[in-house]
Amino acid sequence: MATLPPITNNPDVRYLGRVLGDVIRAYGGETLYERTEAIRSASVERHRGNGQGSPDVGLGALDLDETLDFVRGFMLFSMLANLAEDRQGIAAEEGADVAAALGRLAEAGVDRDQVLALLDRALIAPVLTAHPTEVRRKSMIDHRNRIAQLMALRDRGVDATPEGDQVDEAIVRQVALLWQTRVLRRERLYVTDEVETALSYLRDVFLPVIPALYQRWDRALGARVPAFLRPGSWIGGDRDGNPFVTADSLRAALARASRAVLGYYLDQLHAMGAELSISSDHGAVDEGVLALAEASGDTSETRSDEPYRRAISGIYARTAATYQKLTGEPAPRPGTLRGEPYPDPAALRADLKTIARPLSAEGAGLLGTGGAIGRLIRAVEVFGFHLATLDLRQNSAVHEKVVAEMLRGAGVCADYTALDEDARVMLLRQELATPRPLTSRFTAYSDETASELAIVQAAAEAHATYGAACIRQYIVSMTKSVSDLLEVHLLLKEVGLYRPAADGALASAAVMAVPLFETIEDLEAAPAIMTEWFAIPEVRDIARARGHQEVMIGYSDSNKDGGYLTSTWQLSRASTALKPVFDAAGVGMQLFHGRGGAVGRGGGSSFAAIRAQPAGTVQGRIRITEQGEVIAGKYGTRESATTNLEAMASATLLASLEPEQLSNSDNASFAAAMDRLSDAAFRAYRGLVYETEGFRTFFRQMTPIAEIAGLKIGSRPASRKQSDAIEDLRAIPWVFSWAQARVMLPGWYGVGQAIAAFEDRALLREMAQGWPLFAATLANMEMVLAKSDMGIAARYAGLVEDAGLRDSVFGRIRDGWQQTHDGLLDVTAQSHLLEKHPALDASIRLRLPYIEPLNLLQIELMKRHRAGEGDERVRQGILLSINAIATALRNSG
């Protein structure tokens, strides 16, 4: 076995670890501290190869109360270690910034005009979703972020905070607050809770960070770049499998977002009014500024010579009126002036530009738009009055039932569901060609149909209230046919968001129907479905007028369906096969990547993933879901958000403009090799998960899937149906459960068998060196293998009641892991995992000694719980351990 390099803690980890130890001693007592420290030291020494004995040493001495405190302590250490590493740039990737991308493109002969031309039609959108893998309460995240701010002061050698507290004492205070903060939620999250959590990131991080990033990119490109980076959200609009998302929750999500963004504008205007004390006594004032000042109604004698302040007072009054109109509440600081609400964000932007223009033109531009007013103008461009574009999503099966009921109620078709696909398309197109509505307020509809109709009505109201940018996409889950998309158009037509061709004008759709292709079979069918979609003249006209059509591809369900390697390859193949379909239709392609946090759900480096997309498929337009614990990890602080948004932008530029690195012959040989690897991996994965008798029982007894259902971490049910079938289980708890048991099966199973069966290892090594897709696939899998542990997994397997089933299935998993481990090292020419990624290696191995005792305690508590022990502390311990392990693993769901 290879000798692993020593682990060197970064100084922040050591410092915060000492602080946490002092807090545990102060609040938990010397005995708890000593027992915790003994277990920690023994586990660390064992993982460094310096210790002997069982990994259980010391755990048996803990009573239930001490167990709960011990688990909290290890969870908090992992949380603080994550913070320390993020601060030291562990998450940053070399060259993952726009300046570096511009340099690389320049070397390849791509000039800045070409970059600007791309950005003029580009869209990059991180889309926040509420999937339940963020197990930490918002209160915990707030304390973590405060510690990050205090550590930044400490870095600069500052002794005291602006409030006068000693920095080191303030850090201790925050860690003590963490220790005394309840970790677990007492009630299941509601949609409104998820909306508020997402808003905290959008308001506190995205709003200030994105305008500052644009300033950086303007300087790098020497021109004002178009507003191509815009955030999105699913929270409050994603109804697929979530009965708690209704028209009311959609309205609430939009109203709260509008309140947040308009409140931000008011704060910025207030600060700007204080700053722009320019007097007309010291020079001529622009006529546009004077006109705004005169129209403001500000007649204060003290500001009579300060036209900029008076103009801003008027803009503030109009923005406050807009706030009241859109939220139904008075502005937080309404002021004494009254103004007319702005009709749209463009009108607010125009007034701000009126102020900014002379500041740039006079005095050699010393007060130019690069300052606060420039950032506010950029914010209005990006965030409008809606903050983030909210997607709608529903399952195609629901639409089918709703449309059938609408057609039956209108006397158009007695049984729509009995029609074949051609007949459905013909009927839907006939109905879409006429403005006549199908629904009537005198017709009684089922609760489901009434709910869906209320959703589209709320969307239409939102367009009228906040502008069309508030809702752009309607995602259709499980798209199987063209009729699945036309059904959405029919629903939109009922509320005026789809308009038939009339009076020489083409048909139009204010909200785009977006197919979501999720399973392996769906991905294979995607090009044919999109070919049929664009063959419909009115559809093609709408797409061409818009300039693009979005297609969403799902990582989670394709992985659960076909395994890691097959999912990765089929997603790439589907993207490649879709490109000529879009080219033939004369429509730009916009791919929406439904990625999760774990590698088994498309997780890993966004920078590497975007760069690994097939040539010609990015085209400057890409949307990516950001889910669960990934949101806090990537966007928890302004610094981490800046790093990750910069990486997303730079990767998109490179993927769109950098010349193809591979020759046609290499592409062909690599693709043929991946076909063979994928087929072999698919057979191995399906053989284990779907064709092994008793596998679902093995999975449910080995992993804490049942216990995870008791963790109040999301508003959505764990399964789509009342069933224990793997097919019906959502991908999130599927991946999350395997991570808890340290198997990580969705991130690697089948790959080892595929590599072992592939004879040309030299070709695989060439692919690993020269093909970004294969390199990124192996890199993500390598991280998963490093976080898995078959020794710990064997302990979880001991929970399976049938010894024969346990030995048979776990034996196959263990052997598959070893094959994958050995095959990966061979293909990447390494002596041990992560040999070529020492920072990540150190990061993971630092955590392993802290995860192992948590796993062992979790197993013991699960045994007691499943045996019927009713002590509430047993259940609490299980849920705490789930939280702690997820925190330590970082990307586990």
Image (cartoon, grey):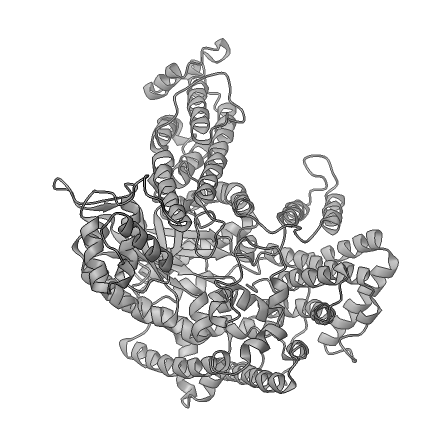
437 left or right of 352 in image = left
Q: Residue furthest left?
A: 504
Q: Is residue 716 above or below residue 771?
A: above
- Residue 88 falls in image quadrant: bottom right
Q: Residue at x 20, y 63 (%)?
A: 422
Q: Residue furthest top?
A: 301
Q: Residue furthest bottom?
A: 759
Q: Is residue 112 visible?
A: no
200 left or right of 472 in image = right
Which quarter of the figure is the C terminus placed in? Answer: bottom right
104 left or right of 420 in image = right
**Residue 71 location in percent, x, y?**
73, 61
Q: Is residue 83 visible?
A: yes
Closest to the observer: 396 or 822? Answer: 396
Q: Residue at x 41, y 86 (%)?
A: 762
Which quarter of the figure is the N terminus placed in? Answer: bottom right
Q: Is residue 213 above or below residue 711?
A: above
**Residue 273 location in percent, x, y?**
49, 24
